[in-house]
Image (tube, rainbow, N blue to C red):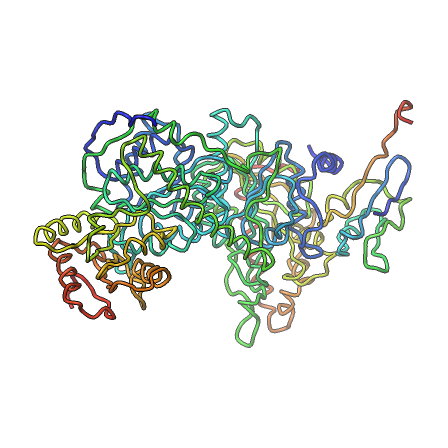
């Protein structure tokens, strides 16, 4: 067992933290296009490249569609590739994100989560990443700048593991995380270099002595099997994730235990399930309620794809009530995280807890502790679980 | 300079692109591809936009390509090429690759004039060293002859059909070669599958420049244009002889004309053998024929004024 | 594979690859090639062939090739 590396605390934003991770990973190619709130990631990184701190070639493309297209080209060529985007940029990329996953490109995509238009809005919600949830990527959600940094490093290994080989998206909440400075412990450069290692592509396009045809036309006789292989790759990502977090914990002293953070969960009767930065508010709320004797806890998944359905169902077994808070809505249905958890509980538990769904924070709407406390009150009052509720909305 | 024997010799050494593909009989695209690939001496990596050439040559698990080949989508061949070429430069700098490699992107006119124009423009502006080849058959042929920005005025297509109130496509085609030239890239050329020597030499010149190069190659489509399969090369030749499709190149911004017909044939010589123009020969459409001839004459005169010199290949 | 010899050159046609488009027939400057009863390329007048290679270069289907007969060294015979 190795000793955790010496780490210095730096006061940096989530965007800067992601850029530092990129500097230390030192990818070969970074095709990228500016968009708020992702832009400070690439601006910070561009300065690192300009200062000669890494050997990366940035391609300043003319759109996110071309960013992902160039990323696929560079990745298939045999190089290590990272890109970054938000919202409309991810929407424009999405056609090629699906193809990147099917061509098994281990591209890491840093996402500054932002609401999708329209109306146009630059603030945080998860409608962008949720739109991409079926694309075949691993999806990781960071709560704060430290996690944004750590998850970028783990993402690189996860993507490039030959059992996985799919893109990994690392989400950090737009502005709340991307633009807020926090103390972040950065690993020494050489420790990261050793952790991420060299990318070893299986079939590099540029191997002209062993030519490959990449991205061919697959008809009904093969398409289905190729899709099944992608499903298997995401399944394999589960065990690789567990292996990597052990390794990363030994390195950094920071443990991403399992697939989700369980905060005061074991003895909780009431549970809030929430992704990303609002979990910080939820912890404050839970502490306040605990002081009043309410047994409430938090389950915060950091892995959304592959969805840890069995593990979450086990963790929620025997709870009185669970409220899933979604910062996105599948219009015409309910929140995407709720739908997953509802299916997981139905699949694995003979007796389900009461399950509620709240939509919150769309387009950057603030969610203070009082609102989260009201959700717990609703659960205690056993309000009707068949109603989809909106938190902090003016009706 | 390459002759047929030399091109055949290169092919014998290494068949980069092979037969048994599913392109239609008489298709111009494979003529374009094999001429270009045989003309380039260095190892080549091909980037292909979605289109006839892509679907008909790579039906999984078969392939007609013996060199590295990649396809991602319809509108992004130039962007994918940007990524491949950048990766190449980085990996070469890091000592992971030692060979000289050339990158050739192939796209049809739909993937180049229309949906892929933005990606192409971006890649040209950034100055990646690659050759973009548009095999221009003047419509979306892979999906059954829908009009594109390259479809000529008055041609019949399935989305600009001839009817009581329509004579085919009412707009003129855009001049993509000139749009590309406006990017100030080192080499731009217009060529035709009919003139293999000219095409092979242009491919070789394109491979030699240190930066982006673009070839717009007229490539016949017997099914879409409506002509017998054995006329593919001849009809491409008529486009050159009527000055509908002049052969020229733009080297570092200087325009060079490569061919002046001894006797400029009337445009009807090119139009008549193609069913897509059959309606133009009905008496009520005589005015359209006159307009087309006038357009060709004007374009040709304009080109003559732009060309600084004449250099037959 | 059909083989047509003349002097130190020979021409090969692979009928399985030929789609019978006729581009070679139209391209041949000497009228050597025809489409036969099966609609495939055939070198009917091989005696006229000058082995210029234009048919090979223009065939969209890689069905025709022109070769020089390899002169074997005595030691190999």
Q: Looking at the rendering, in which quadrant would you find the C terminus of chain B?
A: top right
Identify the image quadrant of residue B158: bottom right
Residue B175 makes an appearance in the image: no
Identify the image quadrant of residue B225: bottom right
Residue B93, percent from left and from top: 47, 25
Q: Nearer the viewer, residue A84 or A170?
A: A170
Please, which residue is most extreme toward the bottom here?
Answer: B164
* Mark count: 0
Residue A351, percent from left and from top: 30, 64
Residue A136, percent from left and from top: 43, 51
- In the rendered view, does A176 fall on the left or right side of B3? left
- In the rendered view, does A133 fall on the left or right side of B168? left
Identify the image quadrant of residue C77: top right
- In the rendered view, does A362 fall on the left or right side of B172? left
Q: Nearer the viewer, residue A26 or A188?
A: A188
Q: Is A223 placed above or below A251 here?
A: below
Residue B170, percent from left and from top: 51, 65
- In the rendered view, does B272 fall on the left or right side of B92? right
Q: Nearer the viewer, residue B235 or A233?
A: A233
Please, which residue is most extreme toward the top here?
Answer: C75
Q: Nearer the viewer, residue B255 or A312?
A: A312
Q: Looking at the rendering, in which quadrant would you find the N terminus of chain B?
A: top right
Residue A40 makes an appearance in the image: yes
């Amino acid at each position: 067992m190795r000793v955790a590396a010496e780490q210095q605390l730096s006061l940096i934003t989530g965007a800067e933290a992601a850029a530092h991770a990129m500097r230390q990973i030192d990818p070969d190619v970074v095709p990228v296009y500016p968009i708020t709130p992702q832009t400070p990631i690439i601006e910070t990184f561009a300065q690192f490249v300009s200062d000669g701190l890494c050997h990366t070639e940035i391609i300043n493309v003319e759109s996110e569609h071309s960013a992902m297209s160039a990323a696929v080209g560079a990745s298939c060529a045999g190089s290590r590739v990272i890109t970054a985007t938000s919202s409309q940029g991810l929407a424009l990329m999405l056609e090629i994100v699906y193809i990147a996953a099917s061509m098994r490109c281990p591209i890491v995509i840093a996402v500054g989560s932002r609401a999708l238009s329209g109306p146009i809005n630059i603030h945080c919600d998860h409608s962008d990443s949720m739109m991409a949830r079926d694309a075949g990527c691993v999806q990781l959600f960071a709560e704060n700048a430290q996690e944004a940094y750590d998850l970028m490093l783990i993402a690189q290994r996860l993507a490039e593991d030959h059992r996985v080989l799919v893109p990994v998206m690392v989400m950090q909440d737009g502005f709340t995380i991307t633009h807020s400075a926090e103390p972040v412990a950065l690993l020494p450069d050489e420790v990261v270099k050793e952790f991420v290692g060299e990318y070893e592509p299986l079939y590099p396009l540029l191997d002209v002595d062993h030519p490959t045809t990449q991205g061919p036309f697959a008809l009904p006789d093969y398409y289905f099997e190729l899709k099944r292989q992608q499903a298997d790759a995401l399944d394999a990502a589960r065990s690789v994730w567990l292996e990597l977090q052990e390794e990363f914990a030994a390195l950094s002293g920071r443990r991403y235990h399992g697939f989700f953070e369980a905060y005061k969960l074991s003895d909780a009767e009431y549970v809030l399930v929430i992704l990303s930065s609002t979990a910080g508010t939820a912890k404050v709320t839970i502490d306040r309620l605990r002081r009043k004797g309410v047994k409430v806890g938090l389950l915060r998944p950091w892995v959304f794809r592959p969805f840890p359905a069995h593990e979450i169902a086990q963790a929620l077994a025997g709870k009185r009530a669970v409220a899933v808070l979604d910062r996105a809505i599948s219009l015409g249905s309910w929140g995407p995280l709720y739908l997953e958890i509802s299916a997981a509980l139905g699949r694995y538990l003979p007796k389900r807890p009461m399950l509620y769904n709240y939509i919150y924070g769309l387009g950057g709407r603030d969610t203070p502790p009082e609102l989260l406390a009201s959700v717990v009150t609703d659960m205690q009052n056993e309000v009707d679980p068949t109603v989809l509720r909106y938190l902090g909305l003016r009706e | 300079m390459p002759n047929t024997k030399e091109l055949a010799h290169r092919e014998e050494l290494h068949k980069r692109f092979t037969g048994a593909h599913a392109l239609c009989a008489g298709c111009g695209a494979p003529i374009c591809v094999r001429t270009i690939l045989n003309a380039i001496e260095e190892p080549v990596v091909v980037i292909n936009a979605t289109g006839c050439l892509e679907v008909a040559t790579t039906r999984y698990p078969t392939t007609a390509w013996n060199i590295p080949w990649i396809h991602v989508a319809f509108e992004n061949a130039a962007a994918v090429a940007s990524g491949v070429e950048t990766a190449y430069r980085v990996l070469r700098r890091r000592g992971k690759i030692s060979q000289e490699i050339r990158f050739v992107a192939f796209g049809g006119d739909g993937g180049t004039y229309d949906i892929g124009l933005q990606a192409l423009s971006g890649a040209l502006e950034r100055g990646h060293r690659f050759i973009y080849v548009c095999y221009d058959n003047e419509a979306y042929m892979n999906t059954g002859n829908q009009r594109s920005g390259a479809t000529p005025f008055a041609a019949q297509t399935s989305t600009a059909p001839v009817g009581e109130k329509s004579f085919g496509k009412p707009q003129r085609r855009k001049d993509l070669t000139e749009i590309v030239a406006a990017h100030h890239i080192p080499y731009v050329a217009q060529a035709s599958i009919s003139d293999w020597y000219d095409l092979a030499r242009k491919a070789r010149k394109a491979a030699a420049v240190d930066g982006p190069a673009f070839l717009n190659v007229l490539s016949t489509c017997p099914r879409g244009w409506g002509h017998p399969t054995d006329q593919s090369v001849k009809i491409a030749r008529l486009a050159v002889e009527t000055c509908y499709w002049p052969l020229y190149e733009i080297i570092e911004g200087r325009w060079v004309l490569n061919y002046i017909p001894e006797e400029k044939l009337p445009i009807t010589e090119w139009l008549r053998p193609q069913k897509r123009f059959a309606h133009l020969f009905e008496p009520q459409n005589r005015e359209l024929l006159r307009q087309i001839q006038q357009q060709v004459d004007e374009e040709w005169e304009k080109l003559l004024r732009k060309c600084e010199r004449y250099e037959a290949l | 594979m059909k083989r047509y010899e003349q002097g130190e050159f020979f021409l090969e046609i692979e009928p399985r690859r030929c789609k019978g488009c006729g581009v070679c027939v139209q391209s041949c400057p000497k009228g050597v090639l025809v489409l036969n009863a099966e609609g495939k390329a055939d070198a009917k007048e091989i005696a006229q062939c000058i082995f210029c290679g234009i048919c090979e270069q223009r065939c969209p289907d890689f069905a025709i090739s022109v070769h020089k007969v390899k002169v074997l060294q005595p030691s190999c015979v």
